[in-house]
Amino acid sequence: MITQAGLAEIKTYADGIGPWKFYILPAQGRDAAGNAAMALDRASNMSPSSLIADAHKAGLFVHLYTFRDEAEHLTRTYNGDPKAEYKAYFDLGADGVFTDFSTTGRVALTSGSRRMVLRNS
């Protein structure tokens, strides 16, 4: 459903999509022995996908889930700063997010120039 054809189909019955945030910024990493990183905080973000742009092109809003403050829920890309994670997704064009930490989300939101929607999950 995250192909252009799938998004066009979704547009026939919905105004937006709510994908897992890692469909936008996938995480990947290796430990010192070359094994796949099993802990998110040992992985880094890869290049962003085109899902937000593709959804917007199809006329859909994009609200991502779930944003949290704890370091184990952040890739090492953000150096333990959850506001940096929000900003990365806002900068890619996310229209809103689901979060368990609305205060952090609000701080990240108001430090940027885009208007977003925060939803408690």
Image: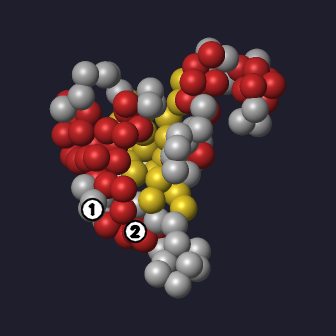
Q: Confirm whether residue 54 shows in the render.
A: yes
First along the sequence among labels 2 and 1: 2
As drawn, is 88 to the left or to the right of 24? Answer: left
Up/down of 88 relative to 14, above or below: below
- The residues bearing labels 2 and 1 have C-alpha atoms spaced at a distance of 8 Å
Q: At 31% across and 65% down in the image, what residue appears?
A: 70
SS label for mark 1: loop
Identify the mark at residue 80; answer none if there is no mark.
1
Quarter location, residue 109: top left
Image quadrant in which the N terminus is located: top right
Q: Residue furthest front?
A: 33
Q: Which mark is residue 93?
A: none
60 w.r.t. 68: above or below: above
As helix, strand or loop, the secondary structure at mark 2 comes to helix
Image quadrant of residue 5? top right
**Kind of residue sitting beneath label 2:** Asp
Q: Position of 98 compared to 48: left or right?
A: left
Q: Position of residue 66 (x, y in %)?
A: 46, 51
Please give the label number shown on residue 41.
2
44 horizontally vs 84: left or right: right
Question: Could you tell me which residue is drawn at 20 percent across and 30 percent down?
Answer: 110
Residue 105, image x and y in percent?
28, 43
Mark 1 nearby-residue class (10 Å; few <14, some 14–19, many ≥20): some
On the image, the x and y values in percent for residue 79 come to: 27, 60
Q: Nearer the viewer, residue 10 or 24?
A: 24
> How many numbered discs?
2
Within-10-Å neighbours for mark 2: few <14, some 14–19, many 20+? many
Asked if residue 8 lies left or right of residue 41, the reply is right
What residue is drawn where x is 49% and y is 78%?
31
Q: Is residue 7 above or below residue 67?
A: above
Residue 17 visible to an observer of this rendering: no
